[in-house]
Image: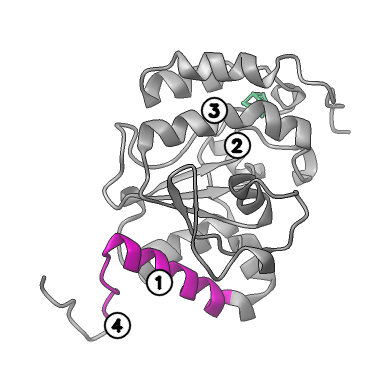
Amino acid sequence: MPRPVPTTPALTQADVRAQAAACPDLESLAAAVSRCEACGLARTRTQTVFMDGARTGACKSGLLFVGEAPGADEDRQGVPFVGRAGQLLTEIITKGIGIPREDVQIANVLKCRPPENRDPTSAEKEVCTPWLERQIELTSPRVIVPLGKHAANYHLGLPPETPMGATRGRTHVRKGRMLIPTYHPAYLLRSPGEKKACWQDIQVAMNVLGIAKAPRKGQTKPSS
Ligand code: SF4
C-alpha cells in the first residue's frame, strides 16, 4: 500500500524561493533540494532527483531538457531519465543530435517522484518550481526543451491540461529563455509515429544552438 501523501505543502512557494536564492551554486542547490521537505512527496520518495549533466554552471551544448517528474527508476537511482523513456532520450541526444549525454543538462519540474507516477498536483508544482527556477538561473541554458505537456505548460504559464498540439512545433521566448517544447519520450514509446515530429523539434533546437546534424552511418561529419 503506498503511503498517503499530505496534500497541503508544509512550506510556501516564497519559503522555497528564499532557500533556493540563498544557494550560490549548483552543488549547494542540490544539497538544499536533497533536504527539502516542503511538500508531502518528501515522505514517499527514496531520494530527490536533482539533475544530470554538468554541475559547474552552463553545459557544453547550452541545451536543457526538462521533464515532468521522476519515475520509479529515477527515484531509485537519483538521476533523471534513466528508465526506458530515459534510454530513448539518450538516443535522441547521442544518435540524433550526435553529442554525448554529458554535454546537455536534464532536469524535471518536480524533484521527487509522485506515488504510482501520478501527475504532479498544482500545489506540488507551485512549491517545488523555485528549485528549478534557480537551477535555470545557475545553468543559464540557451535553449530549454520541455518534454511533455506538464513541463511545456509550466514553462509557458499555461493551464496544466493544455494539449501539446497548442505548444509544440514552434519556438517560444519566455522570461528571456528560448523554449522548444516536444513530446515526452514516454509518450513516444507509446506513440512511435510521433517520433518524426519530435525530431523536427530537436532539429530546430540544433539550428538555434549551431549544432551540425550528426552524420549518417558511413558518412564523416563535415569539418567546421
Ligand atoms: S517535490 Fe519538490 S517541494 Fe516537494 S519535497 Fe520534493 S523537492 Fe521539496
Q: Residue at x 68, y 37 (%)?
A: 113
Region rendered in magenta: 195-215
Judged from the image, the secondary structure of the residue bearing numbered disc 2 is helix
Residue 46 can be seen, yes or no:
no
Estimate the x, y position of residue 193 in percent, counting from the top left. Answer: 63, 81
Residue 203, numbered circle? 1
Please state which of residues 99 and 17 is positioned toward the viewer in this rendering.
17
| Disc nearest the viewer among 1 and 2 | 1
Is residue 109 located in the magenta-colored stretch of the structure? no
Residue 48: image quadrant is: top right
Under 8 Å from ligand 1: the CB of mark 2? no
Under 8 Å from ligand 1: the CB of mark 3? yes
Q: Which residue is mark 3?
A: 131
Q: Residue at x 69, y 70 (%)?
A: 190
Question: In the rendered structure, which amino acid carries the disc numbered 3?
Answer: Trp
Estimate the x, y position of residue 1 in percent, counting from the top left. Answer: 89, 33
Q: Which residue is mark 4?
A: 216
Judged from the image, the secondary structure of the residue bearing numbered disc 3 is helix
Check whether the beta carbons of the residues at disc 1 and disc 2 lie within 8 A of each other. Answer: no
Judged from the image, the secondary structure of the residue bearing numbered disc 4 is loop
Question: In the rendered structure, which amino acid carries the disc numbered 1?
Answer: Gln
Separation of residues labelled 1 and 3 (CA atoms): 29 Å
Q: Earlier in the sequence, mark 2 or mark 4?
A: 2
Q: Earlier in the sequence, mark 3 or mark 4?
A: 3
Residue 73 lies left or right of residue 212; in this view the side is right
Position of the C terminus by quadrant: bottom left
Residue furthest to the bottom in view is 218
Instruction: Categorize mark 3 by other alpha carbons within 10 Å: few (<14), some (14-19), many (20+).
Output: many
